[in-house]
Image (cartoon, rainbow, N blue to C red):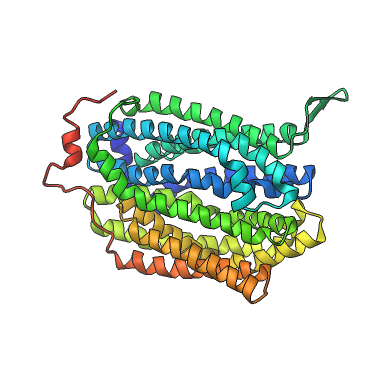
Amino acid sequence: MESLGKFRDNILNGPIGKTLLWLGLPLMLVQLVNISYNLVDSFWLSRYSEIALAVPRQVWPTFMFLNAIINGLMAANLAIISQLVGGRRYEEAHKIVSQFVTVSLSLNAVLAIAYFYLRPFIFRYIVQTPPALYDDVLGYSGIIAIDIVLSALTLTYSTILQSIGDTRTPAYVNLVAAIANFILDPPFIIGLRINGAYIIPPMGAVGAATATVLARFSGLVALMVFLNKRYPYLTPKLTRRLEKEWVLMSFKIGAPVTLMMASNSLAFMFQNALINQYGEYAATAAAIGFLLMDLADAFLWGFTSSVAVMIGQALGANLIERARKIARLASLYIAVSTGIASMIVFIFRGFFINIFTSNAAVYAEAERFVSLFLPSLPFFTLFFIGMSVGRGSGKTFIPTVVGVVRLWGVRLALGYFLSNQLGWGTVGIWLAMALSNYFSGLAMYGWVHRGSWAAPLFRHQEKIMLHRMGNKPLNR
């Protein structure tokens, strides 16, 4: 228990800026590694064919849709576990961990099977993948179905570790998994020949998916071993029964996040369909543009989880004003950092685009997209900091509403109107995407700074539902 107490004391009593860095730098490293993987993946796919790098972007929203439930569970259990740890209620935290892992495994196994059989319908009629990409998308998504389970369990174990303040272990494990991906990508995508004979045939997008699944599996095994050895008192055990109190609390906190993620993923599917009507070159340009966005907002993804953990533990310890201060300072620090990174990427955008395409039409479209969308990223940062505040505090309703309006009202409806009704084409789509970030960032900034979210989930003078759970035997 000493290691738990050490993490707790640092998070609750350390300087806010320093603690954000202490928690966030490992996660930012993970994101930079993941971005590096995506860049390498896209580079090798671009060497396989000039449009193959668009394949993962076609599949990603459907994957996110199936991950909506685990994201809701993550949001709920990050808030629950971090606040229990903040209140030194370690036995109850262990019980929650076991139920969290059990539900994650069971639900995502069912979802993976359903996805495998439904994917032809999804990509033909919903995403409306261009014919030139369809076969590769179908092959890629078939392999990625396995990753639905592996990814969910990886996120589950990472959430458990992050909730107690250990952001380094997931970072190191992700680093190793990404290195494995770097190594596996070239032979699986473009093939491996020895003495003129292919040992591994070129597989293109299917090879990229295979490399991803193998690397993810190795990372998951490492996370499980680390948790079991370093924090044996939090080692999860599969349980046949779930505590009603935990189910209700997870649903209350996680349902808005799940609905938002499901809504977001559907919106991104329709966004892809909107882009796909302009052909495979527009789809490829969008894929390149989003790679550059990932470079610019690496700071954002590195620190959002640390903000949620710090706010969750501060509220669990009844440090209300500290929680509010964390939210304010995080908004400032991370938005400024993202703005600086966006300026750097904007200056060198031509160089980056040239790495992935030599096609003049794809280059021109990607450059247009980046020029319109990149300046909005600091506002996108403010939106996601608000999401982290909601997850750490367990107040997820307002962020969910803003997120839904951002995508369905501004990005999709306005994008359709500008591109199809006014005849602006892809420019209308890119402009609506940028405006959606400005709107959501300003809306969430106001909500975060008002501070109405700053109230703990658990009372400090009374025994609450989860405390009673600690007096029952763990169901297996």
Q: With 265 as the anchor, is 163 left or right in this view?
A: left
| Residue 352 % position (x, y) | 72, 56
Q: Is residue 361 left or right of residue 183?
A: right
Q: Residue at x 59, y 68 (%)?
A: 416
- Vertical side of 212 occupied by 383: above or below: below
State which quadrant residue 184 falls in.
Answer: top right
Image quarter (top left, top right, bottom left or bottom right) of the N terminus:
top left
Q: Position of residue 157 (x, y in %)?
A: 42, 34
Give whichever of 333, 108 is nearer the camera. 108
Q: Quadrant location of residue 411?
A: bottom right
> Can residue 20 be seen at all in this image of the molecule?
no
Location of residue 76 in the rendering, given as x and y in whole percent from the top left corner = 33, 45
- Rendered-image quadrant of the C terminus: top left
Front-lying residue, 425 or 438: 425
Looking at this view, name the residue that lies furthest to the bottom. Answer: 422
Q: Where is residue 287 shown, x and y percent of the image?
A: 66, 54
